[in-house]
Image: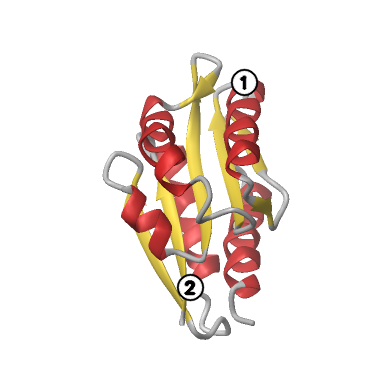
Amino acid sequence: MATLLIVHHTPSPNCQALFEAVVSGATDPEIENVRVVRLPALSATASDVLAADGYLLGTPANLGYMSGALKHFFDQVYYPCLDATRGRPFGYWVHGGNDVTGAVRGVEAITTGLGWRRAAEAVTVTGEPGKGDVERCWELGATVAAGLMG
């Protein structure tokens, strides 16, 4: 059975709504043989990353960058996971009040350095999430999880 690790920082109701949509997509009953593990960014460890076959990452855009919690996660896992996780699939979502550019750039730079393979388009949302944003997050979760079924 494959394992999908969802690492998230959800400090607001908007971030929580997007996180719940990602989890709903990843745990859709049609997706079989994929175990979904959800961990806050400040709790996820290198062992969690090494034990997973794919990743979903969620963060708010804070002061023009990813949250400190997600950055801390990356700082803790980068070198211990660098060689062992190359080529693994991932996806991510970012929520911001008005701009997510810096957060996207940061996540892209670190995951490129890790050698992870983007398995779905990133979901970026500014302002209050609408129905379409929630649907895109559901699709993100489902797409990455379904990719691990094979």
The extreme top residue here reads 63
Three-letter amino acid code at disc 1?
Gly
For disc 1, the marked residue is 102
Q: Which residue: 51% across, 45% down? A: 82
Mark 2 or 1, nearer chain start: 2
Q: Is residue 138 above or below residue 72?
A: below
- Rendered location of residue 56, percent (x, y): 52, 53
The residue tagged with tag 1: helix, strand or loop? Answer: helix
- Rendered location of residue 57, percent (x, y): 50, 47
Badge 1 crowding class, 10 Å Cα cut-off, few under 14, some 14 to 19, many 20 or more, is some
Three-letter amino acid code at disc 2?
Thr
Please identify the quarter of the rendering in which residue 137 is found. bottom right
Badge 2 crowding class, 10 Å Cα cut-off, few under 14, some 14 to 19, many 20 or more, is many
Q: Which residue: 31% across, 48% down? A: 45
The residue tagged with tag 2: helix, strand or loop? Answer: loop
Please identify the quarter of the rendering in which residue 89 is found. bottom right
- Rendered location of residue 70, percent (x, y): 42, 34
Q: Which residue: 52% across, 68% down? A: 26
Q: Left of 112 or right of it: where is 42?
A: left
- Rendered location of residue 113, percent (x, y): 61, 36
